Amino acid sequence: MRRQASVQGSKAMVVLAALAVLATGTSCSKMMPTAPSSAIPARSMKPGAQAASTTSNYAWVTLADKWVNKGETAAVAGGRYKVDFTRGSLSAGAQVAIQERDPALVDFVVGPMNTVCSSKATTMTISYASSNADVMVNGMIRVPNLYRLNESTGAWEAVAGTNDSVNKKFTAKVSVLGGYVLDFVDPGKGGW
């Protein structure tokens, strides 16, 4: 009986030793096939604007990310978007980012979210050629309007601006950074 227990114990030790050899024999640089993997390496992720809470399930792509000091004139530009800050338009320095979810849509975030700009002008310029707001693309003969998502109420608010239909650019003075949409229909009423 003792000898049988000793043989079974020896077999168990051999199996454990074999498993240990297999586990340590694989390269450390390779992950097991069942190991979790990250789609985006941590070193390539940049801090940026937060996506609007009502659209947080979309994948936002950072187009621009720049530090803007309180007392400087600066432009942050990326993709079809440009935001011009005049001296003193920010009450404090901020890491300003521009993000979009689809290059064919003029649906974007300028952050940090809910940053209030001072009474000095902050100008947003959107080049909407070949987008959903371009009449040549969708055939609508209307003027696009800019809307900002009010994070507190969840409602889209119209933002006054000027449309240059020849150059396909929309320009507006903005007082709050956040989620914006340029479209022909109020996103709150158009099925967004």
Image: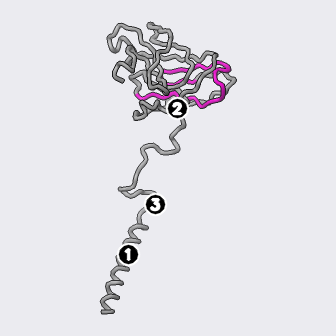
Residue shown at 40% from the left, 67% from the top: 23
**Residue 79: % across, % down:** 48, 24
As measured in the structure, the alpha-carbon distance from the residue carrying label 1 to the one carrying label 2 is 51 Å
Q: Mark 1–mark 2 contact, CB under 8 Å?
A: no
Q: Which residue is mark 1?
A: 16
Give above or below for 94 relative to 24. above
Q: Which residue type does callout 2 highlight?
A: Ala
Nearest to the eye among marks 1 and 2: give it. Answer: 2
Residue range (magenta): 76-101
Identify the image quadrant of the N terminus: bottom left
Instruction: Reply yes or no: does residue 98 show up in magenta.
Output: yes
Instruction: Reply yes or no: does residue 35 show up in magenta.
Output: no
Q: Secondary structure at mark 3?
A: loop
Drawn side of residue 52 relative to residue 12, left or right: right
**Residue 136: % across, % down:** 35, 11
Q: Which residue is mark 2?
A: 49
Nearest to the eye among marks 3 and 2: give it. Answer: 2
Residue situated furthest front in the rendering? 153
Q: Secondary structure at mark 1?
A: helix
Identify the image quadrant of the C terminus: top left
**Residue 58: % across, % down:** 40, 33
Q: Which residue is mark 3?
A: 28
